[in-house]
Image (tube, rainbow, N blue to C red):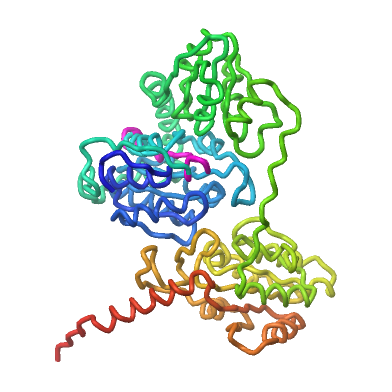
């Protein structure tokens, strides 16, 4: 990509800014709507890698920042739940280089199990948060986030939402950047035990330093933060964040508008001064009334949106309804074609067997979650990544024996690596009296988010060969009593016969059903052939006698 104006999505803009900022490592876990950030960063020539899950990604990023390298960590909103453990303590530490954590929220749950508002994390973890309203600000705020991170030695959250992630607007890159050129000194380790070893003796003063940093950042945000005023009339004044600011400009072009770029800590004096000149102030924000509640607590008179509009994405029409106080039922959107498992998908055969055996299925997150829909309706629970094994074990522990023996946990290959391994450890350590059966549906890719690699594929983010986790070997090493591999080229009825046998045993069992995703299979064959060709043409190792 050149430095001339470009039409980019928010995800692409963040990747370009990361390249221009000299980010030395990008880590993350794929999840819509954040996935394209690292894929684009890799395509532009940056060093990017998928981690097993978001917690590991942030821990790797934290280590890189301690070592003096600018690092970008990406995830969707629910991924920040997984990464919250290191995030909260990372705020106490003093980073050497900038660390920016992208949280891509999904209002309206286009591809998620909830629509949590991750602005709450900024306040809870006590880290600064920036919120761009378009691709240009996504680019600018990424650069700014690294500056803020390095000035105050803190991680910075960059919160984007679905529309900003995927909508394209013009981006004019800043002048003077040489793509991929390192920023700052070469990485190197400098020992600073009190700033990085968070035992109580060091964490207590670190917490006090953190609060002082936040006070300084709040003052900076008031004086020179990324907040903009679009002049208009005083009868109606709007305060907006993120994509809501774009909708506000179109819905009420005559109104004065204050857009808040850094939403934690807030520029309260800037907001107060703006509001004092207005007859009516309305806060526009997607998700929870985080900004509206903060202004109310600060004694700034402003209207929040009615509860009716707390759910789903905002758009221009909804903003107009909010400003008009319209609480009438909203038009019902036309029904689209319901999602379904692809024709030829190996998961279809699995769910047909589970349905026909009348199993109680503890399910998980992935394209195979579609097994809950007709004609299968073979999934009874789905909570979060990796929950299938723990939930299945809980059911096994308490149900009457006849019902307990019907319980099966179903999990995908990428999800198993993400957070299913500890569930398998729980099964070995606390086995139910009836035993348990876990199915790993291994289609050789992270299919739901666009066919990304993971540690079970043996390929990196850029599809080059690397180490591979073999699920069957792992299960045997952990002590699972029965481990089976079912290839879907096998004779019909193989899986049904095997499951009947395992469900009757009071033992722990793991079944791996393996067949490549029908969409990813041609790519997988291409990657494997390319790897074989490279191996065949590689010079032979020289062995000295």
Q: Residue at x 75, y 71 (%)?
A: 407
Relative placement, left or right, of 342 versus 161 is: right
> The C terminus is located in which quarter?
bottom left
**In which quarter of the view is residue 496 placed?**
bottom right
Tell which residue pokes out farthest to the left in this image. Answer: 545
Q: Does any portion of residue 102 appear in the rendered image? A: yes
Q: Where is residue 36 in the image (x, y as percent from the top left)?
A: 43, 52
Between 395 and 335, the residue placed more toward the observer is 335
State the image coordinates of residue 426 (x, y, percent, origin top left).
Answer: 63, 67
Which residue occupies 56% across, 81% down?
A: 476
Q: Give the range drawn in magenta.
A: 148-166
Based on the picture, tell me whether residue 171 belongs to the magenta stretch. no
Q: In this view, does 57 lie above or below 512?
A: above
Residue 285 vertical position relative to residue 369 in the rendered view, above or below: above
| Extreme residue in the front direction | 334
Q: Nearer the viewer, residue 76 or 52?
A: 76
Q: Give me the residue at 44% from left, 18% from top.
A: 230
Counting labels gives 0
Q: Which of 62 and 110 is in front in this view?
A: 110
Q: Residue furthest bottom?
A: 545
Q: Residue at x 33, y 45 (%)?
A: 16
Visible in this render: residue 440? no
Q: Where is residue 444 in the image (x, y as percent from the top left)?
A: 50, 72
- The picture quadrant where one finds residue 284 is top right
When the figure is inspected, residue 474 is found, relative to residue 489, above or below; the finding is above
Q: Position of residue 269 (x, y in %)?
A: 47, 15
Residue 150 sits inside the magenta stretch: yes
């Amino acid at each position: 990509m050149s430095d001339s104006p470009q039409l980019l999505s928010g995800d692409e803009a963040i990747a370009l800014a990361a390249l221009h900022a000299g980010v030395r490592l990008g880590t993350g876990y794929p999840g819509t709507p954040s996935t394209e950030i690292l894929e684009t960063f890799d395509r532009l020539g940056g060093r990017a890698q998928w981690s097993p899950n978001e917690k590991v990604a942030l821990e790797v990023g934290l280590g890189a920042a301690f070592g003096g390298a600018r690092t970008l960590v990406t995830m969707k909103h629910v991924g920040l739940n997984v990464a919250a453990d290191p995030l909260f303590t990372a705020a106490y530490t003093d980073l050497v280089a900038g660390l920016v954590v992208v949280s891509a929220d999904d209002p309206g749950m286009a591809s998620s199990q909830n629509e949590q508002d991750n602005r709450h994390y900024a306040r809870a973890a006590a880290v600064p948060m920036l919120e761009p309203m378009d691709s240009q600000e996504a680019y600018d705020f990424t650069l700014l986030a690294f500056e803020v991170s390095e000035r105050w030695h803190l991680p910075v959250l960059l919160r984007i939402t679905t529309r900003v992630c995927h909508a394209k607007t013009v981006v004019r890159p800043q002048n003077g950047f040489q793509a991929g050129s390192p920023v700052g000194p070469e990485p190197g380790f400098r020992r600073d035990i009190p700033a990085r070893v968070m035992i109580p003796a060091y964490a207590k003063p670190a917490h006090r330093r953190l609060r002082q940093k936040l006070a300084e950042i709040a003052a900076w945000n008031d004086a020179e933060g990324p907040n903009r005023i679009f002049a208009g009339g005083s009868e109606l004044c709007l305060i907006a964040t993120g994509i809501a600011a774009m909708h506000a400009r179109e819905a009420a072009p005559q109104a004065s508008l204050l857009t808040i770029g850094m939403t934690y800590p807030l520029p309260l004096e800037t907001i107060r001064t703006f509001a004092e000149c207005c007859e009516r102030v309305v806060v526009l924000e997607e998700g929870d009334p985080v900004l509206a509640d903060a202004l109310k607590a600060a004694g700034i008179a402003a209207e929040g949106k009615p509860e009716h509009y707390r759910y789903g994405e905002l758009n221009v029409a909804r903003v107009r309804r909010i400003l008009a106080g319209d609480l009438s039922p909203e038009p019902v959107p036309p029904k689209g074609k319901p999602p379904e498992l692809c024709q030829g998908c190996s998961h279809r055969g699995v769910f047909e067997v589970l349905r026909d055996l009348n199993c109680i299925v503890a399910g998980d997150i992935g394209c195979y979650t579609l097994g809950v829909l007709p004609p299968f309706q073979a999934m009874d629970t789905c909570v979060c990544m990796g929950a299938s094994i723990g939930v299945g074990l809980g059911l096994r522990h308490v149900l009457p024996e006849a019902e307990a023996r019907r319980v099966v946990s179903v999990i995908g290959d990428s999800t198993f690596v993400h957070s299913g391994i500890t569930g398998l450890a729980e099964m070995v350590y606390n086995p139910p009296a009836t035993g348990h059966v876990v199915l790993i549906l291994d289609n050789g890719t992270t299919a739901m988010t666009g066919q990304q690699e993971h540690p079970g594929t043996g390929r990196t983010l850029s599809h080059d060969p690397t180490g591979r986790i073999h699920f069957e070997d792992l299960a045997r090493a952990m002590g699972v009593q029965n481990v089976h591999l079912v290839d879907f080229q096998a004779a019909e009825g193989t899986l049904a016969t095997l499951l009947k046998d395992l469900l009757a045993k009071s033992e722990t069992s793991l079944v791996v059903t393996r067949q490549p995703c029908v969409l990813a299979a041609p790519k997988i064959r291409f990657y494997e052939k390319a790897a074989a060709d490279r191996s065949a043409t590689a010079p032979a190792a020289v062995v000295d006698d």
